[in-house]
Image (spheres, grey):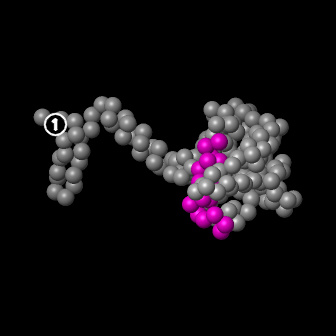
Amino acid sequence: LVQNGDLIRIGQITLKFIQGAAEGAYHEELYRLVTLDPLTQAYNRRHFEQELAREHSRSVRYGRKFSLILFDFDHFKEINDQFGHLAGDAVLKEAAAQIRERLRRDDILARVGGEEFAILCPESDLDGACHLASDLGELIRKLRVIYEGLTIQATISLGVAEWSGEDETPDALYQRADRLLYEAKERGRDRYCR
């Protein structure tokens, strides 16, 4: 009789028998590991792209709106150069935690690059997403990260785009938000463009 936790060896393969709640916890942990960025606990790019495609399909089917915000940290290389990469990691981790607290339950925060993040905003029009972008800019501007006795401040630049309709693919929306992000940087950083 096989019991929970028993190891079964077949040649060079070892299997572990897991039964009941432990199996569910195991699968939840696996899901967490493959969908979350380990540093920031924001979703990873792969999961974000899946959610963006899903939201696009849902919006096409039901005629609903959604928006996308892309942002990255201004002069982040200078933070890393001045304070070190571990301090830069501390900034990303704390900023992501603060941003998650500000988002609605259905909004999806993802780390899509080194210091670049995306927020998928279901059921949000451009004005609503711009309001969120403004709040996030203010939140990061006020954030003080203490690392090894040093206080680190940062700002972000954001690009905000509302899905324009079923002719706009998820990739096209992402590219449009990305162009707006770079427009915000060109206009002096620490701002959003729509």
- Amino acid type at circle 1 is Val
Residue 2 to residue 170: above or below: above
User: Where is residue 84 drawn, in percent x and y?
Assistant: 60, 65
Q: Quadrant of the N terminus?
A: top left
Toward the bottom, the furthest residue is: 81
Query: Do we see residue 170 in this rendering?
Result: no
For residue 26, side relative to residue 31 (left or right):
left
Q: Residue at x 22, y 40 (%)?
A: 5
Q: Residue at x 61, y 47 (%)?
A: 94
Q: Nearer the viewer, residue 113 or 91?
A: 91
Q: Is residue 87 magenta?
A: yes
Toward the right, the furthest residue is: 187
Element type at marker 1?
Answer: loop
Q: Residue at x 66, y 42 (%)?
A: 99
User: Where is residue 190 drawn, in percent x and y?
Assistant: 80, 53
Q: Nearer the viewer, residue 184 or 145?
A: 145
User: Where is residue 24 drawn, in percent x and y?
Assistant: 37, 35
Q: Is residue 97 magenta?
A: yes
The rendered magenta stretch, by its main secondary structure, is classed as helix
Q: Quadrant of residue 100?
A: top right
For residue 51, side relative to residue 29 (left or right):
right
User: Where is residue 165 drawn, in percent x and y?
Assistant: 77, 42
For residue 185, side relative to residue 12 (left or right):
right
In the image, which residues are magenta?
81-98
Q: Which residue is mark 1?
A: 2
